[in-house]
Amino acid sequence: MANSEATPRSPCVFSNVLDILGDRWTLLIVRDLFFFGKHEYKEFLSSPEAIATNILASRLQKLVCAGIIDEMPHPQNKSRKLYFLTERGKDLLPMLVEMAKWGEKHLTQTEVMRPLFEVIRRDAAAFQRKVLRDLKNWEKANLA
Amino acid sequence: MANSEATPRSPCVFSNVLDILGDRWTLLIVRDLFFFGKHEYKEFLSSPEAIATNILASRLQKLVCAGIIDEMPHPQNKSRKLYFLTERGKDLLPMLVEMAKWGEKHLTQTEVMRPLFEVIRRDAAAFQRKVLRDLKNWEKANLA
DNA sequence: TAAAAGCACTTGCATTTTGCAAGTACTTAT
DNA sequence: ATAAGTACTTGCAAAATGCAAGTGCTTTTA
């Protein structure tokens, strides 16, 4: 299932990154973790793109294998899990911000993120600090 | 073949960007245009990832449709074409740079881009200026 | 100038991945 | 005790990918 670190098709950074993140779903999960405070399976399912359950399960597993997210049992409920970004995952923020900037500039039909993007455009660095601060707060409340 | 602008699965920037760029091949072509001065079909084929001819053809077409690249007949050879980044395509550079930075920091086995990345790390802004200057020079020599 | 080679694809087909619907096993609420 | 919630897995049809072999056009070579 994962050829992430096994025998890469080439020694190029880009192809290696794309082997992990290069599909239509994986970064949407990362987006939900960064920008929508989502941490649970059912929350990812509820996103407007309507990811299928089997795809979600496989992508969560792939992200855990790649060290981008980690999981823990839900403290109040044994049948649930909490997913959260690792440091490696949080380092994806600048890339996501550039992606959003490009999309906002060149694509139409991107209303959902528009309010969020106004903040990005006003001060991208401050926006990134706020996102990371929010994640830290969640970690303080939920980890160890 | 292209659902790029038709009926997007959601109004989110990220899903819209991923519908265009979210696969394991498309950004490799963009990489070749940015960093390796490639402009021809056979040059893309010669990349170490060994893209299949049908995939390459479909991706070039998709990139043209998305307005990220454009094509023109080869001035010296009627049976060849030249592909080049549009302004919209060139705006992808910051995203690619962030992608490379993330990959260099967190993935192993990325030797090929290592020398290039040393330059990125030393001064990312200067690197981007140089890349864009090189593209401009190519355009001066090859476009109209 | 005829034959061979180069070039940018297209086609056919086997394999893999995706998408959808329906389970399943376990836990929690009523 | 029963029903509902949760995080998956399974089965299967449809789509995308990967590979090998064309195809039609242009350019080079003998």
Image (cartoon, coloured by chain):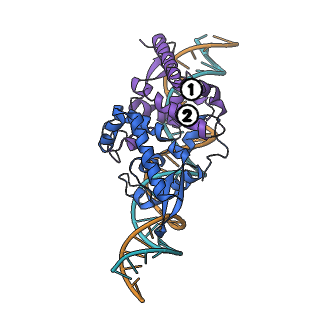
Chain colours: A blue, B purple, C cyan, D orange
Residue B83: give x, y in percent of width and height.
48, 23
According to the picture, the residue beneath numbered tag 2 turns out to be B101
The number of callouts visible is 2
For the residue pair B101 and D3, the one nearer the viewer reads as B101
Residue A127: give x, y in percent of width and height.
39, 39
Residue A9: give x, y in percent of width and height.
63, 39
Amino acid at circle 2: Lys
Q: Look at the picture and state if B115 lies above or below A142.
A: above
CB under 8 Å between discs 1 and 2: yes
Quadrant into which the C terminus of chain B falls: top left
**Quick one: SS at disc 1?**
helix
Q: Is residue B51 visible?
A: no
Labels 1 and 2 positioned on one and the same chain = yes
Residue A121: give x, y in percent of width and height.
35, 33
**Left or right side of B4 for A58:** right
Which numbered dot is residue B69?
Answer: none
Dot 2: within a 10 Å radius of its alpha carbon, few (fewer than 14), some, or many (20 or more) residues? many
Dot 1 or dot 2, earlier in sequence = 2
**Residue A88: quarter of image:** top right
Q: CA distance from mark 1 to mark 2?
A: 8 Å
Quadrant into which the N terminus of chain B falls: top left
Amino acid at circle 1: Ile
According to the picture, the residue beneath numbered tag 1 turns out to be B120
